[in-house]
Image (cartoon, grey):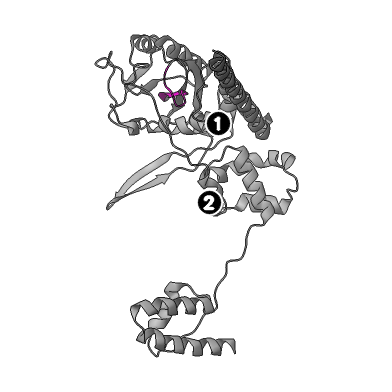
Amino acid sequence: MAGERLKNALKKYRVRYQKAARNERTQLLTEFCKMTGYHRKYAISLLNKKDEPVTLLPRRTRSVSYCDEALSVVEKIWEKAGYPWSSRLVQLLPLWMPWARRHIRGITPEIEAKVLSISARQIDRRLQGKKRKLRTKIYGRTKPGSLLKCQIPVRTDNWDVNAPGYLEIDLVSHSGSCANGEFIYSLNVTDIHTCWCETRAIMGKGQAGVVKALDEIRQALPFKIKAIDSDNGSEFINHHLVRYCEQHEIKFTRSRPYRKNDNAYIEQKNWTHVRRIFGWDRLDTHEQMENMNRLYRNELSLMMNLFQPCTKLKSKERVGSKIRRRYEEPKTPLDRLLSAMGTQPELALRRYIELRDTTDPFQLSRGIEESLDGIHRYDSLNKRRKSSRKITG
C-alpha cells in the first residue's frame, strides 16, 4: 500500500513539476524529497521522466560498522600519538594496541578487531570535526647568507636515494611575536630515505652553536652521515660548517634561494617535530633550552622514530592539469632503517628494537606532555616576573 501511494504521489508531482516555472520547481522538489527521503538528484531524474513506468526503490541506509567503544579507543590512541593523519594512524594502531590494553579500559577482543579493521577514510569521517580545531600556520625567521655561496654547490634536483645518510637540515625559531634579542632555535635534521629525525635546541643561530649541535646529532644517529643539504641562511653558509663537513667527509649542498620545495622533507618535519609540539611562544632562557634538549634526546626521539609511522612520496604523474601522487605504505623510521640495513642489523639498531619492544608509548606521550607543561609553566612565570619588574620600575 505504501508503494502504491508513493507511485500516485509521483504521478501528481511529475505533472506539477513539468508544468511549473523554474522558481516553483525548487519548492516542489524540496517537498518531494522531504516526503520520500530521496536524494535531490535522484528525485530530479524521476520527475523529469514522462509517463514511463518507474520502479521506486526504498531508501538505502548504511549500517553502522563500528561501535562507539571502538571509535573511542581509536580517538584516544589518536590523541596520545600526537594527532597523526588517518593513513599513518591505521598503520600505528597495531603497534600501539598491545599497550592500549593496559591503559584503556573495556577493550574486548571484539572491540580490538573492529579497531584494527577500521579504514583511513572512516577515520577521516569520524574525526573530521576535531581535526578542524587543530589547523594552524607556520612562520619562519631566517635570512639568506652571502658567504661561500660559490663554494657550496646548489642542488637543483631531488635526491633519489635508496640508502640512509642523506640529510636535510633547517632551523626553526622560537621568537614568538618579537624577533628582537636572543632566543632559542631548534636545529632539525631528517634523513630522506628513512625519515629518521633528530633535533637539538641552541641559543641563537651562531655558527659555532649550529656546528656543535650538528656534531651531537651526528653521534646520536644510528647511521653515518653521507651528505647534508640546507637552505641559504647564514647559519649554514659559513666557514665553520664547511670545515666540519670536510673533516668528516660529508658532502655539503644548498637549495635554490626562495625555493622551499627544494627542502620539502625538512619543511614537513619542522611542523610535525617542532612547531606542532612547542607552538609559537617565545622561548629564550637557558633553562628552557636544557629542558627542550632533554626532551629532544629522549622522549621525542623515541616517539617519532620508533612509534610514529610516516609516509613517503612514491611517484608523481601529471594527468592533464592535475598531478596524481602515489605514496608508499606508512612505516616508522626504524622499520625503514631495518629494511635498508638488511636481515642483520647493527648493534645500535638492535638497541632500538629492544627499546621499542619494552617502551610504553602511552608513558612516552605522558612524559612529553609533562615536560611541555613544565617548559610553558616556566615561560609564563618568567613573563610575570618581567611584567612586575616593569611596573615596579
Task: Compare marks 2 and 1 and give the one earlier in the sequence.
Answer: 2
Q: Where does the image place residue 185, in percent across and percent down from the top left? A: 46, 20
One can see residue 59 in this view: yes
Q: Is residue 170 magenta?
A: yes
Taking the spot 49% from the left edge, 29% from the top edge, the residue there is 280
What's under tag 2, amino acid-wise?
Answer: Asp
Label 1 Cα crowd, 10 Å radius (few <14 / some 14-19 / many 20+): many
What's under tag 1, amino acid-wise?
Answer: Met
Of the 4 image quadrants, the one containing the C terminus is top right
Residue stretch in magenta: 167-180
Taking the spot 52% from the left edge, 32% from the top edge, the residue there is 333
- Drawn side of residue 218 relative to residue 97, left or right: left
Taking the spot 55% from the left edge, 78% from the top edge, the residue there is 58
Whole-angstrom CA distance, mark 2 to mark 1, is 22 Å
Q: Is 255 in front, or is 233?
A: 233
The single residue placed furthest to the front in the displayed view is: 392
Q: Secondary structure at mark 2?
A: helix
Question: Which residue corresponds to mark 1?
Answer: 304
Taking the spot 68% from the left edge, 31% from the top edge, the residue there is 363
- Drawn side of residue 325 relative to residue 151, left or right: right
One can see residue 347 in this view: no
Q: Where does the image place residue 57, in percent across and percent down from the top left? A: 52, 80
Question: Which residue corresponds to mark 2?
Answer: 124
- Drawn side of residue 290 relative to residue 211, left or right: right
Residue 343: image quadrant is top right
Q: Secondary structure at mark 1?
A: helix
Label 2 Cα crowd, 10 Å radius (few <14 / some 14-19 / many 20+): some
